[in-house]
Image (spheres, grey):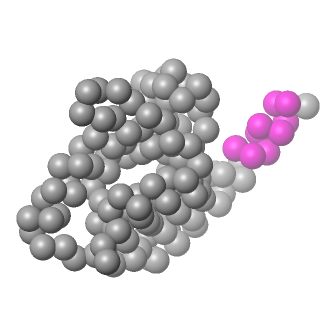
Amino acid sequence: MKTIVRAFFKTVRAVLGPFMLLKERLTQPKGVVREPAAQTTVNLQCQNLALYQFSTCPFCIKVRQEMRRLSLPIEQRDAQHNATHRAELQQGSGATKVPCLKITDASGKSQWLVDSAAIIGYLRGRFATT
């Protein structure tokens, strides 16, 4: 039974995935425009962030849209097709739930933030312009 359920959802993802990616591409928000010095500072801060995600996950799409809206060049790591990234996600956060934002501080300590609403709240709180 478990195999049948997995096969069903894999088929649904295969059919709906391209449409979800097309919708994401067609509805990309315009990013905020910052002064060059401010954007450089944001770019440097984003080097300590990594988003573990699946390309067709609706919650991951929501986070990626917010990243575009805030003009954040955060590294996106495919935890669905890349075994290394999937293993890092499993080891760091304790699960393979996506989206998951890895936040590394100056001392090299990592914090894992799971849940799209929490990630979006964190990004808005840290990078939103007024």
Locate residue 70, reporting x and y percent.
34, 68
66 is higher (above) or lower (below) than 48: below
Which residue corresponds to the image point at 71% horizontal and 48% vertical from the top-left?
A: 11
Residue 49 or 109: which is nearer the viewer?
Answer: 109
38 is higher (above) or lower (below) than 54: below
17 is higher (above) or lower (below) than 114: below
Residue 92 or 86: which is nearer the viewer?
Answer: 92
Q: Give the residues in magenta.
A: 2-10
Q: Is residue 5 magenta?
A: yes
4 relative to 38 in the view: left or right: right
Q: How many marks?
A: 0
Locate residue 52, reporting x and y percent.
46, 41
36 is higher (above) or lower (below) than 94: below
Locate residue 102, reporting x and y percent.
41, 38
Which residue corresponds to the image point at 70% horizontal and 44% vertical from the top-left?
A: 10
Locate residue 17, reporting x and y percent.
59, 57
Q: Main secondary structure of the magenta part?
A: helix
Residue 77 visible to an observer of this rendering: no
Residue 23 or 63: which is nearer the viewer?
Answer: 63
116 relative to 31 in the view: left or right: right
62 relative to 26 in the view: left or right: right
> The C terminus appears in which quarter of the rendering?
bottom left
Residue 65 or 10: which is nearer the viewer?
Answer: 65
